[in-house]
Amino acid sequence: MKKHLLAIAVTALAAGSVFAQANDTLAKIKSSGSVTLGVRESSGLGYTLGNGKYVGFHTEMGERILHDIQKQLGLSKLEIKYQPVTSQNRIPLVQNGTVDIECGSTTNNTARQKDAAFAFTTYVEEVRIATRANSGIQSIKDLNGKTIVTTTGTTSVQTLRKNKRADGLTFKEVMGKDHADSFLMLETGRADAFIMDGSILAANISKSKAPSDYKIVGEVLSVEPIACMLRKDDPAFKKAVDDSIVRQIKDGSLTKLYDKWFLQPIPPNNVKIGLPLSEATKEAWAHPNDKPMEAYEVK
């Protein structure tokens, strides 16, 4: 009987430990010696080179965050596991503990804050329109009667519909399963325009077979703060992540990282994306914060 009670107690203790670690990511990392980083396969801020190799501005920044946390926890070694995520599954994978920190291209908005926490903003995105250079599309009004592609799980077309300049427009909407698939629809003529984050559009254009065949046009549809996503109600882990971001801003390493991935030739085709650091991103770095998209205004 005593053995039975002891077994129940041990089981309960173990279960309690697992439950406690669900909202204590630092404890989870320290006890396991590993951490799972959510990454993107075809984003402007992170992408894959194949064979399990993930690179890009946010991917490398995320790795640096985790190296800082490794030092904080006094771990001689930390295994970083890479979990590719999509626009559709990124929030559930953070919520259920599959991903500890997602550093892809996720907009911090009030709706998502109900499901997840966000680190300090590290990139301020502008949603734009990409089209073929010979399409004749120059602005929102030229989208009337056209086919527009965006990526499943993103909010870009909803953003367009809310734009006052889109009043009275009718257009067909098609969805790509990921950003590469969406760009392929533009590339193959199945869509007239691709609406998405400017960095994603620029990255896909730079990696295309004929970059000069495409252009980014028209008005800014929305301004969106992009941040690493974390589980809710884990203030110690959020502080550790935010502290690393502030460290990278203050010592200039984040600026150098941005220059590496946006202003220098990058793999696999050794081309430049060519997006200078925006004033909005500079402002976010000068005053680190986790304000949602609703706090930003389209000018």
Image (tube, rainbow, N blue to C red):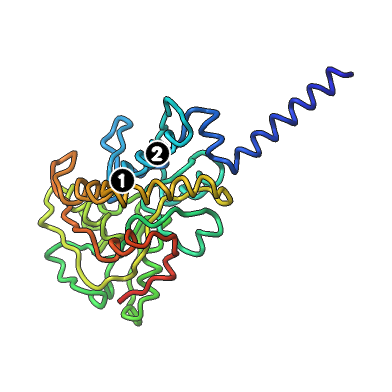
**Residue at position x 46%, y 34% in the image:** 35
- Is 244 in front, or is 233? 244
> The residue under label 1 is which amino acid type?
Gly
In the rendered image, the quadrant that contains the C terminus is: bottom left
- Is 174 in front, or is 127? 127
In the rendered image, the quadrant that contains the N terminus is: top right
**Residue at position x 30%, y 61% in the image:** 281
* Left or right: 94 as drawn, with respect to 271: right
Q: What secondary structure is found at the residue carrying circle 2?
A: helix
Give x and y (percent) for residue 136. 15, 71
Mark count: 2
Outermost right residue: 1
Give x and y (percent) for residue 102. 43, 46
The 10 Å Cα crowd at callout 2, few under 14, some 14 to 19, many 20 or more, is some
N-terminal-most mark, 2 or 1: 1
What residue sits right under mark 1 in the picture?
A: 46
Q: Is residue 260 visible?
A: yes
What residue sits right under mark 2 in the picture?
A: 68
285 relative to 236, above or below: below
Q: Is residue 177 visible?
A: no
Label 2 to label 1, Cα distance in Å? 20 Å
**Residue at position x 33%, y 31% in the image:** 52
Q: Quadrant of residue 47?
A: top left
